[in-house]
Image (tube, rainbow, N blue to C red):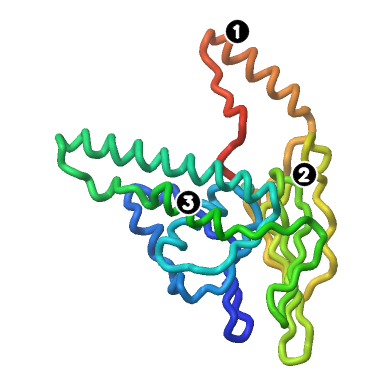
């Protein structure tokens, strides 16, 4: 959360699946959702978007700013989250011989997803957008996923302009369909993802080669089944 004077901006609002054995932990925001003025969503992956319907359910009433593909993909992924919650809730009930397991209660329902997607306001890449008189936002492509963006905020702080960038997740170059990550302009503050820490991506094999080897191992050598999430991956 970024506070600019009285104005409160939340950047991303992800779901923590580690905590979903007790959904209530995802509801424990360290602030009152009703006090947030605007949400900026960097991309659709559930660990960045998946708790937005909880935020809305608990009182957030502002706009959610994101790129057009992020809005489209988030709607699909959030609805998918609801199906996962419902399946878990049903199996929780069955395991307890008709007794409702409160730990398996859905975190949010389809109506909360609909309330959430109605708050999306879409902004294209590299188009400066004024959030209010003192704050301007620009989305910059970062690869990673369709619509994924870093956000640059220029904030007028009592006459001095300060800039801060939130990278979201950063992708790699030369991926089909996706824009290459674009260089960020110089900023005063940078909040950067560190999912991969100090590890390096392997460059010795192409994605196609890795896929061929996986198919050969799973389907030919081990005579097993290979399940490919062909539409979109949910995590990371
Ligand atoms: Zn991601």
Q: How many marks?
A: 3
Give the vertical position of 63 relative to 52 (above or below): below
Residue situated in front as seen by the camera: 82 or 20: 82
Q: Secondary structure at mark 1?
A: helix
Dot 1 crowding, Cα within 10 Å, few <14, some 14–19, many 20+ = few
How far apart marks 1 and 2 lie (CA) works out to: 31 Å
Give the vertical position of 37 relative to 220 (above or below): below
Q: Is residue 188 left or right of residue 96?
A: right
Tell which tag, 3 or 2, sits nearer the viewer: 3
Give the vertical position of 178 relative to 2 (above or below): above
Give the vertical position of 25 relative to 33 (above or below): above
| Residue 15, position as x, y percentages in the image | 48, 53
Residue at 78% in and 53% down:
141
In the rendered image, the quadrant that contains the C terminus is top right
How far apart marks 1 and 3 lie (CA) works out to: 42 Å
Q: Secondary structure at mark 3?
A: helix
In terms of image quadrants, where is residue 66? Answer: bottom right
According to the picture, the residue beneath numbered tag 1 turns out to be: 220
Q: Earlier in the sequence, mark 3 or mark 2?
A: 3
How far apart marks 3 and 2 lie (CA) works out to: 30 Å
Q: Is residue 87 left or right of residue 176?
A: left
Residue at 72% in and 63% down:
151
| CB contact under 8 Å: marks 1 and 3 | no
In terms of image quadrants, where is residue 94? Answer: top left
Tell which tag, 1 or 3, sits nearer the viewer: 3
Name the disc covering residue 212, or none. Answer: none
| CB contact under 8 Å: marks 1 and 2 | no
According to the picture, the residue beneath numbered tag 3 turns out to be: 113
Residue at 65% in and 49% down:
70
According to the picture, the residue beneath numbered tag 2 turns out to be: 172
């Amino acid at each position: 959360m970024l506070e600019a004077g009285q104005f409160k901006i939340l950047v991303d609002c992800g779901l923590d699946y580690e905590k979903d054995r007790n959904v209530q932990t995802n509801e424990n925001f360290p602030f009152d959702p009703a006090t947030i003025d605007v949400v900026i969503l960097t991309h659709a992956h559930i660990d960045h978007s998946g708790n937005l319907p909880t935020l809305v359910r608990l009182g957030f009433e502002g706009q959610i700013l994101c790129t057009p593909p992020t809005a489209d993909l988030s709607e699909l992924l959030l609805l998918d989250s609801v199906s996962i919650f419902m399946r878990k809730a049903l199996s929780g009930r069955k395991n307890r011989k008709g007794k409702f397991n409160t730990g398996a209660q859905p975190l949010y329902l389809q109506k909360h997803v609909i309330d959430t997607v109605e708050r999306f306001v879409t902004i294209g890449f590299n188009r400066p957008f004024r959030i209010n008189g003192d704050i301007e936002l620009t989305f910059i492509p970062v690869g990673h996923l369709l619509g994924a963006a870093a956000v640059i905020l220029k904030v007028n702080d009592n006459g001095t302009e300060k800039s801060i960038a939130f990278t979201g997740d950063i992708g790699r170059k030369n991926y089909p369909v996706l824009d290459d990550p674009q260089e960020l302009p110089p900023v005063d503050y940078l909040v950067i993802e560190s999912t991969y820490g100090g590890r390096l991506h392997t460059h010795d094999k192409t994605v196609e080669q890795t896929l061929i080897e996986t198919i050969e191992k799973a389907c030919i050598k081990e005579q097993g089944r290979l399940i490919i999430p062909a539409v979109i991956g949910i995590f990371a």
